[in-house]
Amino acid sequence: MNYNGLEFSWKGHSTVKVEDEGFSLVVDPFNGYVDREAELVLVTHDHEGHFDPEALEKVCGDSTCLVVPESFEGKELPCRDVEYVTEGEVIDVFGVEIEAVPMYNGHHEQGDGFGYRFVMNKTSVYIAGDTGLIKEASQLEGVIDVAFLPVEGVYTMDVEDAIQMAVRIKPSVVVPYHYGEPFFPDAEVDLRGLRAELEDRNIRCQVLDS
């Protein structure tokens, strides 16, 4: 998907890649879903499918910066340049503004991991991570262009909650993710219903192939 000159791809599960003229940012690289080094890597939390040391070995080069929650302090990480962030903190890495956004639900304690809002090429992107429908989402209202929202409904929001979050933050585009292979191949996700509900509210819904 191209948006404002940025190329977005969903590699499966929670692996999202954003490219801007040779500069690449990857969120939650997972083994089998990454193919080359990236300049900037963001990890949301330390659960399986999100924190994958083997995948990090592949994407972390000599000049890669890895951004992780402060809860990762003490973990062995393959990148030499690591930024540990706290909830609500805003940092600048390679000219990319990055904010650690609250991420929690019944399966994830608040503060253990974060979603991320980042700005590339004057485009504000929100990668929600394994979150529920959180009250803090209202703070993102009107400042997000592209939102990746989880929809599998077991460890994250379901479609109905994702619709409510989208209505709260009002992005230009919603991309559903965190469903299907390899962890939820049998989970039924009503993507057609999601698209219809969002487009009724003038929010574009873009379903990407993994």
Image (cartoon, rainbow, N blue to C red):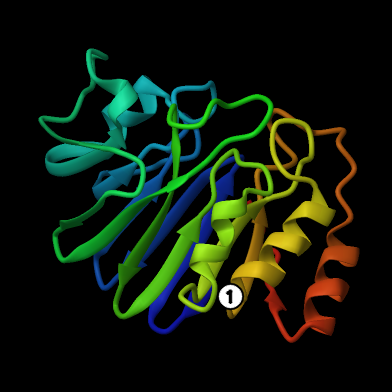
Seen at 33% across and 55% down, the residue is 99
**Horizontal side of residue 185 vs 105, given as left or right:** right
Seen at 61% across and 40% down, the residue is 13
Q: Quadrant of residue 21?
A: bottom left
Seen at 36% across and 21% down, the residue is 54
Which residue in the structure is indicated by mark 1? Answer: 171
Measured as percent of width and height from the top left, residue 113 is found at 44, 33
Quadrant containing the N terminus in the rendered view: bottom right
**Horizontal side of residue 177 vs 8, given as left or right:** right
Q: Secondary structure at mark 1?
A: loop
Seen at 67% across and 42% down, the residue is 132
65 or 165, which lies in front? Answer: 165
93 or 71, which lies in front? Answer: 71
Q: Quadrant of residue 157?
A: top right
Number of callouts in the render? 1
Dot 1 alpha-carbon crowd within 10 angstroms: few under 14, some 14 to 19, many 20 or more: many
Measured as percent of width and height from the top left, residue 178 is found at 65, 43
Dot 1 amino acid type: Pro
133 or 29, which lies in front? Answer: 133
**Horizontal side of residue 171 vs 167, given as left or right:** left
Measured as percent of width and height from the top left, residue 51 is found at 43, 26
Measured as percent of width and height from the top left, residue 45 is found at 44, 30
